[in-house]
Amino acid sequence: MTTPTIVIEVREDIERLRPMVTHVAHVDDVFWQVEAIIEQNPALHGDDVFRNWLGYCYTDSIVIGMRRLVDKRRDVASLVRALQKVKTHASDFRRDWFVGMSSEFLRAEAHGWFTEIVGGQHPRLPPERVQEWLDYLTTTAQQVEQFANDHVAHVALHAIGAPPTFRDVRSALVAAFRTLQWLIRLTSGAVLMTVVPVIPSNWLQPLRVAWLADQVAPAYEHLDDLVKTDQTAPL
């Protein structure tokens, strides 16, 4: 059975979006592992310069990543745009096509999978089902997106709403992952079990050794030095 054109297009969007979701999930996973290490070690408590720096880096990376994933502009790839495409062409996502993707001995199960994906015994994907996912994603990510617009991507003269909590940010990440899961199931029948990449190296090794011990911190190129030697600014 011929694969609908819109399915091919959304699959291409997924290929662009999956690394983006994986990236923010990776940033999230590493940050919270390091945070847990700091929390359990009293020797690392006290001066919070390093911990605050980690928090700022995490926040900026995550909220900008989420802003990209829920971008509504027509000239970008985002989870929101992918859902909007699916909704516009919902009738092309047919049960007979979906079941036909599976081998013959799995087609009974495939009927059940399609029923679960589209939310009922429908021959085609109802647009209302896609709208449910759009509402879920945009509502969950709204506060994070607004914070990114007001404080990270731009400096708003009149900021809207309260800053999100860490829990709000992680809830938005969960919504992004679950939306990606659904899109993958809808377009290929595959199941994405985790979005957090497995790191093959022993990346925690640098945290098991003293970074400075008793030696003096090494010299580095200070930003003030670059300012003093800059010859490109107007005189």
Image (tube, grey):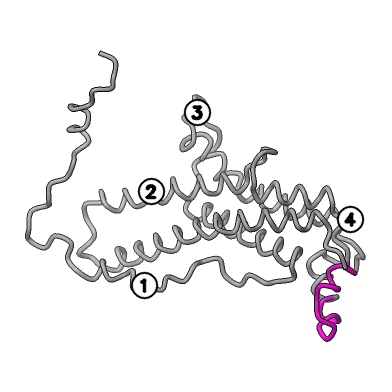
The residue mark sitting in front, 3 or 2, is 2
Disc 2: which residue: 57
Q: Callout 4 environment at 10 Å: few (<14), some (14 to 19), or many (20+)?
A: some
Q: Which residue is under mark 4?
A: 91
Write the residue at 82% across / 65% down.
119
Q: Amino acid at mark 2?
A: Cys
Numbered disc 4: secondary structure? helix
- Residue at the location (84% across, 58% down)? 4
| Real-space CA distance between mark 3 and mark 2, rounded to the nearest whole angstrom | 20 Å
Query: Residue 58, relative to residue 174: is it above or below?
Result: above
Q: Which residue is mark 3?
A: 156
Q: Earlier in the sequence, mark 1 or mark 3?
A: 3
Q: How far apart in space, not on screen, are marks 2 and 4 (Cα)?
A: 43 Å
* Label 2 environment density (alpha carbons within 10 Å; few <14, some 14–19, many ≥20): few
Nearer the viewer's eye, disc 4 or disc 3? 4
Q: Amino acid at mark 1?
A: Ser
Mark 1 = which residue? 201
Residue 149's spot in the image, x, y percent?
A: 53, 36
- Nearer the observer: mark 1 or 2; the answer is 1
- Does the magenta portion include 15? no
Q: CA distance from mark 1 to mark 4?
A: 45 Å
Q: Considering only vertical position in the picture, is 202 above or below 163?
A: below
First reached walking from the N terminus: tag 1 or tag 4: 4
Mark 2: which secondary structure?
Answer: helix
Q: Nearer the viewer, mark 1 or mark 3?
A: 1
Which of the numbered marks, if any, corresponds to residue 22? none
Disc 3, SS: loop
Segment colored magenta: 95-110
- The residue most toward the front is 2
Q: Is residue 101 magenta?
A: yes
**Lateral position of residue 105 relative to residue 18, left or right:** right
